[in-house]
Amino acid sequence: MADKTLTRMDLSEAVFREVGLSRNESAQLVESVLEHMSDALVDGEQVKISSFGTFSVRSKSARVGRNPKTGEEVPINPRRVLTFRPSHLMKDRVASGNKS
């Protein structure tokens, strides 16, 4: 498996090639989409992308954790975490890619 990371620049380059916008307009479009998604998540909304998956924010309550090295109990503060749940189509696509 390759250690490649898909970046914002890769996404804007793909928009540039596929849609035909200028490189600058493509970069602005990608930034706008990502910003809109981030704002929705901050506001507590779910972001559903058909055939891809759902991003949502989950609230986790305070709890007591344990340092695995020392065994010492440590309080873990309440927090909000980002979760992603892939669609069945995405799961199938990723799984079929692993068979080769």
Image: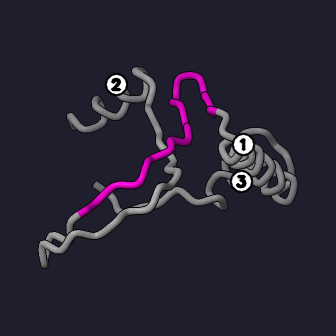
Q: Position of residue 10 (x, y in %)?
A: 62, 57
Whether tag 1 and tag 3 are in contact, CB under 8 A, the answer is no
Would you name the residue on which mark 3 appears?
12
* Position of residue 47 in the picture relative to residue 84 (left or right): right
- Mark 3 Cα shell of 10 Å, populated few (<14), some (14-19), many (≥20): many
Q: Secondary structure at mark 3?
A: helix
Q: Between disc 3 and disc 2, whose residue precedes?
A: 3
**Is residue 15 visible in this depiction of the protein?**
no
Would you name the residue on which mark 2 appears?
92
Q: Amino acid at mark 3?
A: Ser
**Which of the 4 quarters of the picture holds residue 56?**
top right
Does residue 50 belong to the magenta stretch? yes
Q: Amino acid at mark 1?
A: Asp
Q: Secondary structure at mark 1?
A: loop
Q: Look at the image and tell me in which quarter the N terminus lies.
A: bottom left
* Position of residue 72 in the picture relative to residue 2 (left or right): left
Front residue of 20/6: it is 6
Distance Cα–Cα, label 1 vs label 3: 26 Å
Q: Between disc 1 and disc 2, whose residue precedes?
A: 1
**Which of the 4 quarters of the picture holds residue 77?**
bottom left
Q: Is residue 52 above or below residue 38?
A: above
Q: Secondary structure at mark 2?
A: helix
Does residue 96 belong to the magenta stretch? no
Q: Position of residue 31 (x, y in %)?
A: 76, 54
Would you name the residue on which mark 1 appears?
43
Q: Which residues are magenta?
A: 46-65
